[in-house]
Amino acid sequence: MQLYVINLERSKDRLEHITAVFQERNLVFIRVLGVDGSILRRKDFRFLTSKRNWPLKLTYAEVACFLSHRECLRLIGEGPDAYGAIFEDDIILSPNAPVFLKQSSWIPFDTDMIKLDTAGISCLIGRVIAKLEGGYSLAPLMSKHYCAAGYIVSKRCAQWLYKNIEYAIAPIDEIYFNPDCDIMHRLNIYQMIPAPVMQAGLASTIRTSKKEIRLSSNLSMYQKIRKECKRFKKRYCFHMKKRFLFQERRVKIAFQ
């Protein structure tokens, strides 16, 4: 299983950080040059944000982050392995992470994605579907869970996502891990519990920019009401179905 790390050309300090993190765990990664939002062309930004499923306008940095993750999906989809792992360059890894990153035989056959990281917030998960080495487990992720700093994606899923997500309809973590964005309910996404990956608290270089101001979208009242109705239907119908099938419960995902 190849491990891909997104890193901007100008972020040499981040490269040093992530190299040290992976070397400490005796892991090797492939560097994927991140798309720099500061040099993203205006016409490309407009095209990529011309379709949106998100109440706020995206920033150039968020669109660049989307493109960076999408490039990783392309590499996994075209690669020889059944699974690949994608990381941002501001993470820390648990000492137990190599158990799960050096091979993929432990991954259930129906897996599309495994969220390896945690934002340290409460989220809804289903009943445990697999107990893993070292007290770790996998359970279906049922609700929004911030961040896409570390996750595993199957080759099949990577190919599907690359083909079907051409536009930055939302920030990348919302696309993956928010039921409101219409993608999550189509995939088998599992949360690893506890999480062996967490962001180190460094200021993000690919997600935000101090020069950018996020603006509210200019939707009419009718559009806002319609959007809220659709969101309500997706959110609660999704959870009612999942609660019935998977015995949904709320937990705070710890890092370990």
Image: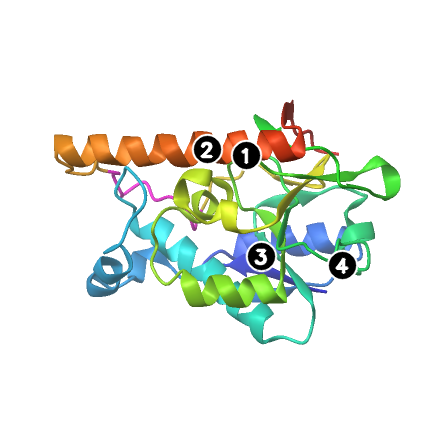
Magenta residues, as a range? 205-214
Q: What amino acid does circle 1 point to?
A: Lys
Q: Residue at x 51, y 36 (%)?
A: 146
Residues at badges 1 and 2 in contact (C-beta under 8 Å)?
A: yes
Q: What amino acid does circle 2 point to?
A: Cys
Residues at badges 3 and 4 in contact (C-beta under 8 Å)?
A: no
Residue 34: which disc? none
Return the disc, 3 or 2, that comes first in the chain's sequence: 3
Residues at badges 1 and 3 in contact (C-beta under 8 Å)?
A: no
Horizontally, residue 169 falls left or right of residue 74, namely left
- Distance between the alpha carbons at the discs numbered 2 and 4: 41 Å
Mark 2 vs mark 4: in front:
2
Q: Which residue is mark 2?
A: 237
- Distance between the alpha carbons at the discs numbered 1 and 3: 43 Å
Q: Quadrant of the N terminus?
A: bottom right
Return the disc, 1 or 4, that comes first in the chain's sequence: 4
Mark 3 vs mark 2: in front:
2
Q: Residue extending furthest right? A: 134
Q: Which residue is mark 4?
A: 27
Q: Which residue is mark 1?
A: 241
